[in-house]
Amino acid sequence: MYRTLFNLVKRKIPKISDTELIALRSGNTSIDRDILRGKVNYPEKFTYQNKFPKDNLSTLLTEYDHTPIYPNSNNNKWVNFLGKNKYFSFLIDEQYGGIKLSTNELSNILTKITSVDPGLGVVTMVPNSLGPGELLIHYGSDDQKNKYLPGLADGSYIPCFGLTGPNNGSDATGSIDKGIVIEKDGKKVIKVSLNKRYITLAPVANLMGIAFELQDPDNLIGKEGVTVALVERSHPNLIQNTHHIPLNAGFPNGTIKGEICVDLDQVIGGEKNIGNGWKMLMECLSAGRGVSLPATANASSKVASFGMFNYIKVRDQFKMPIGNMEAIQEKFNTMIYNTWIIQSAVALTNDILDSGNSPAVISAIMKQQCTERGRHVLNEAMDIHAGASICLGYSNFLEKFYRSAPIGITVEGSNTLTRSLIIFGQGLNKSHPHIFPILDSILNDNLESFKQNFKNIVTHSLSLYRKSFSFSRDLNQQIVDFACLTNFVAIKGGSLKKEQMLSGDMADVFSNLYLAISVQYHQNNHQSSDKLTQYVITRLMNENQEKINKIVNNLGPERYLLQHLKKSNKTDKYQKEREIFQEIMENKKIMDEMKKNIYVEDNILGDLDLINKIDRDSSEYQKLKEKIINVGEYPNVVDIVKFD
Ligand SMILES: Cc1cc2nc3c(=O)[nH]c(=O)nc-3n(C[C@H](O)[C@H](O)[C@H](O)COP(=O)(O)OP(=O)(O)OC[C@H]3O[C@@H](n4cnc5c(N)ncnc54)[C@H](O)[C@@H]3O)c2cc1C
């Protein structure tokens, strides 16, 4: 019987390419597995010590003059400043001159820098994410580490990492640049045709990590596959002469081209790592995606929410502060809802990563959800700020974040693909306690292991199905319901890759459960507001319930077994929204949390913070109010416009 089943499942499972298999085997699992088991264990709060000198950070933030980092006419002043002051060394060990930070500290610093300027944030983020530094730390030979890490730590090397080209975007290795092993002057070398675009820091970088598909048609080394090598700016025939302008965000981004020859010892880790490039990238990406981009979304959401909290008290229309109007309160509540989710998820994920885990699926959830919810916060903020956020000037604290939001959404695995293909698809195979072992037993043609794992999944599924019949309506029950639903959706096997609407909705529910757990985790550790916590979790669960109902309705005959998972939502009462608005305005702990890790000093946010601490009837208040509500005014190009 098991042999027949084995063959049936074998036919049902999707074809898994080597690149997918590597992605599946990279990183590990954490709360994502708990969710699919149907029971969550909250981790311990991680304690860490800050290492980076506070004065160093204050100097950067107070002295930064808001000029574009690139292109500019200042000899790349800010890139050099960051490099020299160790901002590119946060992953590098002290023995190589770096200041290796905990994930928590790294995330907090990135948030604070981004809160001043998203472009400055990107420039700091990139050397501390996937790139030459991280790849050298994990895979470099001793010679390579000794040669490059000290220079990366003190800013004499500015790194960038080139994977993407005109023909390989989301399908990163599909039509990637090719490298061929040839013999030149009696030596084996790799001839690479480079055509990279969109590469962050490329215009200013002098140490490039480049990825290419290595081919060995003459069997000179007997190895092929995606390979990552290091080249310096002075490398013969390397061309770095054009840049892109990503939404005027002011950070360097451009191309790397040329027909070059690379020595085998320029491959990161040397000859033994030829063909291991995709594995190396996936292993680093699984942690990296969970930190940097979520930190930038955290920054923009906190700035928008903290600024708007103060602005709606100051801006009057119809003889009252706009914050008195329910239409504004509703939008503002949505901003806080999403910002609270982002900052809670960042806190939980940083703790998970600091405890030594690198959960790939959680990183994907963090990347997609934080950048998407961050964009939502900015949309609401722009509506409230109205004309003041459309016109550039000192008091516009939103536009630079609004312009940059699509960048975070596009890079490191574009959100559409991450949501509809990766989160649930990878989650099924990786986070599920029993599916990967079954897959593995089939890939290894191991009937015995298949038998055991099949028994496990049946027991697990029956137990969850039984538990899904419950009148309870709390978060734990929704986790059980989702885990049960997952086992039914999993029966679709490989067709899920095509059914991306279903996969996307399952991803949303999966993600929201992780986010709700984060919000509870944050409350357990900070006791900021029970009311806000309950509101956010209930709203996330309501979003989920709508999706669960839709998913069940869209299933095949199995939907008749799952009708009990369809539930009506807890009613959204207008009165509840009013109460939450009041809680946000009155519970000081909420805004204290928002203000953490953003720069509120000699800037518009500092003015907004100050104004609501001074007497409304004073002249000082009036003066500051004028400064806050004023928008930029610039001299006209011609004095008088003549009309014929
Ligand atoms: C500002 C910026 C900085 C960058 N920095 C770097 C860098 O430093 N190094 C580097 O190597 N790369 C970098 N990139 C490249 C970035 O990673 C890619 O832009 C990204 O992978 C998406 O590729 P694409 O833009 O070509 O979109 P496309 O691949 O053309 O995708 C188009 C749309 O189709 C969707 N899609 C594609 N395939 C699927 C699928 N199978 N299922 C569902 N939806 C799908 C995508 O989600 C997207 O919405 C950068 C890009 C930008 C814009």
Image (cartoon, grey):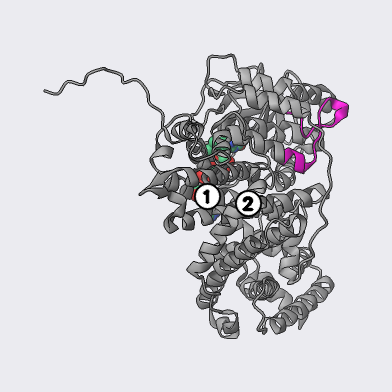
Q: Secondary structure at mark 1?
A: helix
Query: Does the stretch in magenta take in 102?
Result: yes
User: Which residue occupies the foreground of this view, 109 or 410?
Assistant: 109
Residue at horizontal 56%, vertical 81%?
559
Q: Residue 613 at what x, y percent from top left?
A: 58, 40
Residue at horizontal 47%, vertical 48%?
379
Judge from the rendering whether residue 510 lies leftward or rightward of residue 607; answer left or right: right
Q: Residue 39 at what x, y percent from top left?
A: 76, 70
Judge from the rendering whether residue 51 lies leftward or rightward of residue 115; answer left or right: right
Q: Residue 491 at what x, y percent from top left?
A: 63, 74
- 18 w.r.t. 473: above or below: above
User: Which residue occupies the foreground of this view, 342 or 281?
Assistant: 342
Q: Quadrant of the C terminus?
A: top left
User: Which residue occupies the foreground of this view, 343 or 288?
Assistant: 343
* Residue 500 visible in the snapshot: no
Q: Residue 19 at what x, y percent from top left?
A: 67, 50
Q: Quadrant of the N terminus?
A: bottom right
Q: Looking at numbered disc 1 in the image, what kind of residue is underneath it? A: Val
Judge from the rendering whether residue 568 lies leftward or rightward of residue 11; answer left or right: left
Marks 2 & 1, CB-CB < 8 Å contact: yes
Disc sitting over residue 358 in the figure = none
Packing grade of label 2 (10 A; few <14, some 14-19, many >=20) is many
User: Which residue occupies the foreground of this view, 266 or 458?
Assistant: 458
Residue range in magenta is 88-107
Q: Is mark 2 within 8 Å of ligand 1?
A: no
Residue at horizontal 78%, vertical 38%?
273
User: Where does label 1 land, which residue?
Assistant: 377
Of the numbered discs 2 and 1, the one sitting upstream in the chain is 2
- 582 w.r.t. 319: above or below: below
Q: Looking at numbered disc 2 in the image, what kind of residue is underneath it? A: Ile
User: Where does label 2 land, which residue?
Assistant: 342
Residue at horizontal 55%, vertical 65%?
505
